[in-house]
Amino acid sequence: DTGVSQNPRHKITKRGQNVTFRCDPISEHNRLYWYRQTLGQGPEFLTYFQNEAQLEKSRLLSDRFSAERPKGSFSTLEIQRTEQGDSAMYLCASTPYRNTEAFFGQGTRLTVV
Amino acid sequence: DQQVKQNSPSLSVQEGRISILNCDYTNSMFDYFLWYKKYPAEGPTFLISISSIKDKNEDGRFTVFLNKSAKHLSLHIVPSQPGDSAVYFCAAAGSGGGADGLTFGKGTHLIIQP
């Protein structure tokens, strides 16, 4: 296992289309996080899973966003009816315990045109 | 309202000298702090962390100092090398069991000049 893997690396979509991103965390990590990063900003927390349970969602996560982590392994983040403001880098991170370093994937760069 | 602030968007340092990156926070519930390094088109890479029960943590060329009374932390890199050129993010974790994730600053772009 070489780390957190995210697919695709880049996605260009037309406004109004749905997109889905995938994250494969480090296998023994039970905590998984999604973040969003826009230009000139640090990553912003979106949602958190402990195993398969989604325990926290940021107010940044509008109704058009949904995340799942079936069986506590990989996770998906879906954005429905994309808007230009959704253009950002979407980052996934995993960690085995609270207050240890989170390992980040390389991110998915979304561009909505 | 930014709970973690990195007030210097960029910093230029000569190779071999010390780089000092600063970070301030406002939320007294934060009890764990981390520094991440980020190259363009890559995810953040963990550098070093510190618990609120300590005031210093050292790892090779990297040292993090925490001043809880001032709600301030700093990252020292000695000596600075060309490969250190990157964006550095300060991040903080609260005592909420990890459910709230990390709160990041906006980053400081460190440029190491030869």
Image: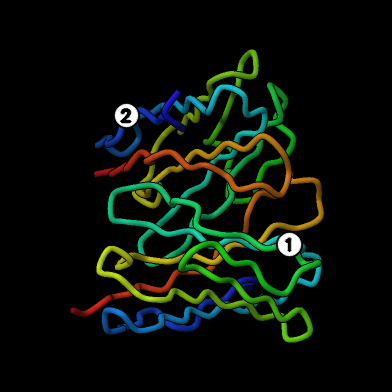
- Relative to residue B107, is residue B14 depicted above or below? below
Q: Is A56 in front, or is B22?
A: B22
- Relative to residue A70, is residue B19 depicted above or below? below
Res. A7 image quadrant: top left
Find disc 1 in the rendering and name its residue. B51
Res. A91 image quadrant: top left
Q: Is A84 in front, or is B27?
A: B27
| Residue A70 image offset from top left, x and y in percent | 61, 15
| Residue A74 image offset from top left, x and y in percent | 53, 21
Q: Is B9 in front, or is A29?
A: A29
- Neighbour class for label 1 at 10 Å: few (<14), some, many (≥20)? some
Give the label, 2 or 1, closer to the camera.
1
Please, what is the three-letter code of the amino acid marked with disc 1?
Ser
Q: Is residue A87 left or right of residue A54?
A: left
Q: Secondary structure at mark 1?
A: strand
- Judged from this view, the residue extending furthest toward the front is B60
Please, what is the three-letter code of the amino acid marked with disc 2?
Pro
**Residue A8, disc:** 2
Q: Residue at x 37, y 76 (%)?
A: B79
Name the quarter where the N terminus of chain B is drawn. Answer: bottom right
Question: Given contact means CB atoms under 8 Å apart, are the residues at marks 2 and 1 in contact?
Answer: no
